[in-house]
Image: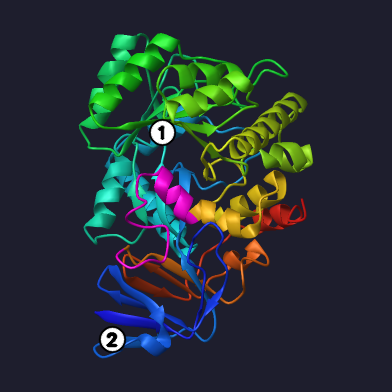
Amino acid sequence: MKKAFTNMILLDGSENMAPLSGYAVLVDGENIAAVLPETECDFQGYEKIDLNGEYLMPGLINLHVHIPADGKPKEKPADAKKAVKLATANPLTRKYTEHMYKSYCRTELFSGVTTFRSVGGVEHYDTWVRDLINAGKALGPRILAANMAISVPGGHMAGSLAYEATSPEEAVRYVHKISTDKPDLIKLMVTGGVLDATVKGEPGVLKMSPDIIRQACEEAHKLGYHVAAHVESPEGLRAALENGVDTIEHGAKPDEEILRLFREKGAVHVATISPALPYVLFDPAVSHVDEMGQHNGKVVFDGIVECAKQCLAHGIPVGLGTDTGCPFVTHYDMWRELHYFHKCCGVPNAFALYTATKRNAEIAGLGDVTGSIETGKCADFIVSAKNPLEHLSALRSLSMVVARGNIIRNPKIKKMPQVEEELDKYLSI
């Protein structure tokens, strides 16, 4: 079907985007056939869709998602190993896991995320749902899937969403094991995190040895995969960058040597401000975090923000992801990550939107496929009544989502009132 989207204000996804009036976007099947002034369009053969003066822009791209968790806050930390064991225990619980995966992917799409990277999931279910969506058997975004990550004994998510490698050789075997389901990237858990820290002031302790990092990266690269790594300390940053990691997920305060390594290795920082914010700003009675967790959360929060600022200042690419699945980080709030990026890192709204669209597409290796409203790219875009360049909260409620040419009008999402209420208190940060 050929469709012409008319009577809109266009935000094209470019770095210095400005509102453009009087344009039409012509879509033929999955792709954008033309972006032209309406006065120059030949609409013959096209169904015209009047957008009533609303804003059309590229679909959002979320570079850091854990599909099987919804972000619902809990009074005490969940036992991830126990949860995964239950999710895969028998045919009935596996059926529920499949339902959960499909439901959360649908929520991502309805919130305006037309592409995301999954960076640690249950068994092979990330690639399973990716393939289901690609075959048209489920509704969801384009997915770049990692499946299980690789950790070490006592490391982050070890034994739940990550295999435990005890040696470089075992890490290499796990890379090959993961590759059998044809993922799109490999994920390493290089450091610990806030929840598994045991000492106040020392979150993100280096867990994975440089030899394991290096050999896992070398093998992944031989097989054609980029490597993303969970990193939350300067020591972890240095080890990951020295040994071949392509994208640093989360981050920490960098020094000049770390910035040099970023540039020398061509590595990228993927900032995830959303999961650290509740640790820093929420009353412990709400976040259910103890004093050590709150302190360590602030260390990580400050490190992520400073890493993003320093990378931007030194011309190092910065992408955005939500780390969906952490407490208070839902499958429908990618727009909040843009807002935090704007407020905490001091970037204009237009740059935040560019980062979450065209820049994220380039980081994901999809720069020629999606991320901007250009002729020949995939028809992945969203429509909002208000202008996100004035306030990014315009993206919290959308009039339309178009993914690979498929139209979803007035998408509805079931939200968590408690999460909305608490997070909205901090829109002014």
The disc label shown at residue 46, or none: 2
Q: How many callouts does the rendering have?
A: 2
Query: On the rendered structure, is 200 left or right of 152?
Result: right
Residue in the picture at 71% in, 50% down: 343
User: In this picture, which residue range is highlighted in magenta?
Assistant: 357-376
Q: From the image, state whether disc 2 or disc 1 is nearer to you.
A: 2
Q: Which mark is residue 84?
A: 1
Q: How is the image coloured?
A: rainbow
Q: Earlier in the sequence, mark 2 or mark 1?
A: 2
Please determine whether, in this image, residue 348 is positioned above or below residue 305.
Answer: below
**Magenta segment, prevailing SS (helix, strand or loop):** loop
| Magenta residue check for 358 | yes
Residue at image position (35%, 50%) is 366
Question: Residue 124: percent from the left, percent from the top?
Answer: 29, 37
Q: Amino acid at mark 2?
A: Tyr
The local secondary structure at tag 2 comes to loop
Q: Measuring 27% from the left and 45% from the top, which residue is drawn there?
A: 128
